[in-house]
Amino acid sequence: MATLLLLRHGRTTANADGGLAGRQPVELDETGRAQAAAVGERLRSVPLAAVVTSPLIRCRQTLELALPDADPLVEEGLIECGYGAWEGQPLKKLAKESLWPVVQQHPSAAVFPQGEAMAAMAARAVAAVRQWDARITAEHGPEAVWLACSHGDVIKAIVADALGVHLDLFQRIVADPASVTAIRYTPLRPFLLRLNDTGGDLAALAPPPRKRRRAARAATSAADSDAPVGGGAGAGR
């Protein structure tokens, strides 16, 4: 199966001010723009079969700076959680709300006033990336790499699903601005290849040279879902 790179947008004015942006049209600040440009330099070593994005402007701005030659396709399933009446509020104020401990300790039960349930956010985000992954694998082959630009809680929910852990544990996962997380889905299980990578070399995630793909596919197709006992030799090719 193809390899998914999850890119969180760069830092926004709301992030810097300690507010909850939600689906409001907040934009990248100076730091966020620099982060987007920097992650673009790292992504140059990885040929991307497709780029998809949340419709919100902070994700589109991140891709314009990181991957100026890309033509991102909008995926509504990757949009930020609908925080409803919480949107635009300072996090310090929200921390005093009765719903806050639920969001922290039992997010699968959290439903935001006039907004979305966190469980619904997780379900539609996971469905979106799995559908895209199957489509890209069918069109470009199992060695393809593709990228999805989204939001912190959305990425954390997708990672929790990949790890097979309950949504109530997803607050243990971190997805910093402009970080890259890599997941490879297989018929039996997903593999988390990178998590919250904000400075590492991404070249190891690139597809193998075309002349080596057929041999590699024949050697591994029967065991794509197996984890190497002892940890294996890593992603180097």
Image (cartoon, rainbow, N blue to C red):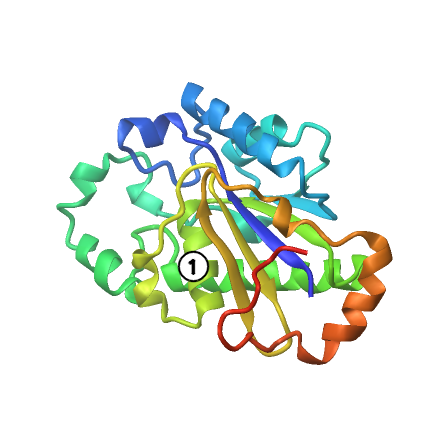
In the rendered image, the vertical position of residue 168 relative to residue 68, given as above or below: below
Horizontal relation, residue 230 to residue 82: left or right: right
Q: Quadrant of residue 11?
A: top left
Callout 1 crowding tier (Cα within 10 Å): few <14, some 14–19, many ≥20: many
Nearest the viewer among 185 and 29 is: 185
Q: Position of residue 45 (x, y in %)?
A: 67, 39
Q: Quadrant of the C terminus?
A: bottom right
Residue 78: give x, y in percent of width and height: 54, 50
Name the residue tied to disc 1: 157
| 111 with respect to 120 (left or right) | left
Q: Total of numbered circles in the picture?
A: 1
Tell which of 151 and 174 is nearer to you: 174
Q: Is residue 133 above or below residue 96?
A: below
Residue sitting at x 71%, y 45%: 48
SS label for mark 1: helix
User: Where in the figure is residue 216, as x and y percent of width and height?
Assistant: 77, 66
For the N terminus, the image quarter is: bottom right
Residue, far top:
30
Q: Residue at x 62, y 38 (%)?
A: 43
Where residue 60 sits, quadrant-wise, is: top right
Image vertical order of residue 191 relative to residue 229, above or below: above
Q: Amino acid at mark 1?
A: Ala
